Image (tube, rainbow, N blue to C red):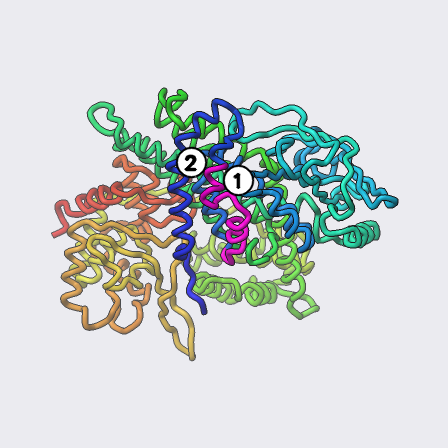
Amino acid sequence: MAEFSLELNEDQIQIQKWVHDFAEDVVRPAGHEWDEREETPWPIIEEAAKIGLYSMEFCANALADPTGLTFPIVSEEMCWGDAGITLSIFGSTLAVAGIVGNGTPEQIGEWVPQCFGTPDKIQLGAFAVSEPDAGSDVSSLRTHAVYDAAKDEWVLNGTKAWITNGGIADLHVIVAAVDPELKARGHASFVVPPGTKGISQGQKYKKHGIRASHTAEVILEDVRVPGSCLLGGKDKLDERLARAREGKSSKVQAALSTFEATRPLVGAQALGIARAAYEYALDYAKERKAFGRAIIENQGIAFKLSDMKMEIDAARLLVWRAAWMAAAKKPFENGEGSMSKLKAGEVAVKVTEEAIQILGGYGYTREYPVERWHRDAKIYTIFENGRPTQVSKTVRGTKREAQRAAATLEARPPSNAGGRTVADVLRAWREVNDPVWAETSRRDYESRVAKIEADPIAATNVARVSVGDVERWHARMRKMGVGESAIRGRHATLRAALAQAVRWDWVGVNVASQARLRMPRRTPREAMSADDVRAVIKAARALDPAAGLALRLAAVAGLRRAEIAALRWDDLDGAQLKVDSSACVVRGDGELVVEDVPTKTANARVVTLDERTVDEIKQLRALRDEVSPYLFSDTVGPANPDRIGWWWQRARDLSGIDKRWRLHDLRHWTATMAITSGHDVRTVAGRLGHANPAMTLRVYAHAVEGADQALATALGDALDGAGTQ
């Protein structure tokens, strides 16, 4: 199997540096001037042509990259320099995409070179779809094309709006309606060659941003083009129209196919603007001093910059995925191209706005480039469809995926057509979901199902389950000493199984509603005090030094017991502890086996430890290093998580603290102690590995460098008070 990697190859790195140098030395210094002039920067385009950046050869090589990443990389670096100039240079690629996406090989060979010209004679291309009354709704185009069979010519009439290079381009690719009744399925693309009569420029738009890019109307008045200018040819068009009239699907729509191919590139351009603003704001925050220190030392500024960087990197991954899918000819079934463009555009607007805030009053003036970048960024949430259209494409893909998943489940309903019991539903539910459960989840669900099957409720006819049945089941569990948390877990499992039964039409919706009981509210109890935590750790250390260390890790590092059981000696690097696996007990060959399984991706993290905890790990290693590669195991595999739980129960009983406390409450103590001490909740979330934002004041988990060390020290100091020796 090929090794997965997000690293750029050597050719891509060289191209990236080459383009970045051009953007840094030529494009960025000229950005302000051409933005003010609101004119096409012909000298910059000529410079790009001289070095081969603006050429058919470069475009062809970039598009031929099997990874699909070369053009997004180039687009990002160029827009890092200036987006308006970049659109002037690469605006012709829209026309190229239209020709390549719809034309025959002969048409591609004839027309694509004319979109670039030569270094001595620069030519431009333009792709024209939008109209004054048809932006995102391409099905409403009024520009129409009529075939003149006597002369083998197409006659085009209409007005196009918001066209990059519109009117000044040498070659225009026009999308027009051939059969208006078929809406978007009745469109075709036509090349209007240089010098064709009847095509002219309408008004030139004065824009908010990307002002170095020429944007204007294109007016078509009885424009006649040869039949050979119909991209794809008339035979192919007639075949497609016939299929559409018969109600059959059409794989290609002239405008939409071009947009889908270019959306990742548009997203990459937005990334370049965002990165430029982030880097500029970062440098400014390092140099700007207020109240005797650099403003980056203030959490408010540092957190802004951290969020900016995170959003840029997340958007880049979406762009790269969409670009790779396009290069690999993988269909955008869930609107992946739209996702990338939507996310990158919104990130660019947000990041540039935050950059202005960081620069303060300076950011609002034209002496600094961030205000121009903010103006440039806004267009990326508008052109090639705005947010509502992009979201609708993603939603349609999500609906299709959900429908396929539902069809899969419905296609394999379990047998047993007679009267079904609760036990039948549970077994069928487990059979269907077993392949998609994570190993740790499978163990929990199987345990809950087994406990429910052991209760008389399992023999109840599923169509007759009542609220009273479930309430009596709860009462039986309480009488047996089952805790409220366990009752909630088993109840949730039964509800999930009944919901599946509804989808199979085994039971009516009312039955599932009957089981939706009002669970008793949890009785809040006080958080553990530092004295309680110190007492239980002291008692654990008296039992076994390893037990004391395990509970200390739960308190200081906020680890779960399964994570503690899977810790290896080589997970510790200095004061940094890697937490990326869990110990899971599975049944194999008639006995229970403990396996080391990866923890959930959202929970994987690196935690900073205090000096005392690091010293205790080193001391334990001196005693146990030869026993096992794991800290708390006596075998070659990880420890059983129940061993950690047993240490906790024994230490809790010996220390005399409230017997209601659970091992998990040490993590709650960690969060409570940290937040009440003034540490940022994002740092706490990152330390605990909370994937659910609601776990820590609904703030997404990500640790902040530097803050985690301070938190580790604070928690360690709290534990190293009186009573720990």
Asked if disc 2 and disc 1 are in contact, CB closer than 8 Å, the reply is no
Front-most of residues 316 and 99:
99
Counting from the top left corner in percent of width and height, residue 403 is at: 65, 54
Mark 1 crowd level (few <14, some 14–19, many ≥20, 10 Å Cα): few
Tell me the residue that label 1 is attached to: 120
Give the magenta range: 46-67
Direction right: furthest residue: 150
Task: Select label 2 or label 1 by which is in front.
Answer: 1
Front-most of residues 86 and 700:
86
- What amino acid is found at the position of numbered circle 2 in the picture? Gly
The image quadrant that residue 365 belongs to is top left
Vertical placement of residue 365 versus 472, above or below: above
Residue 64 painted magenta: yes
Write the residue at 36% across / 44% down: 702
- What amino acid is found at the position of numbered circle 1 in the picture? Asp
Disc 2 from disc 1: Cα separation: 25 Å
Q: Secondary structure at mark 1?
A: loop
Mark identifier at residue 81: 2
- In the rendered image, which quarter contains the N terminus? bottom left
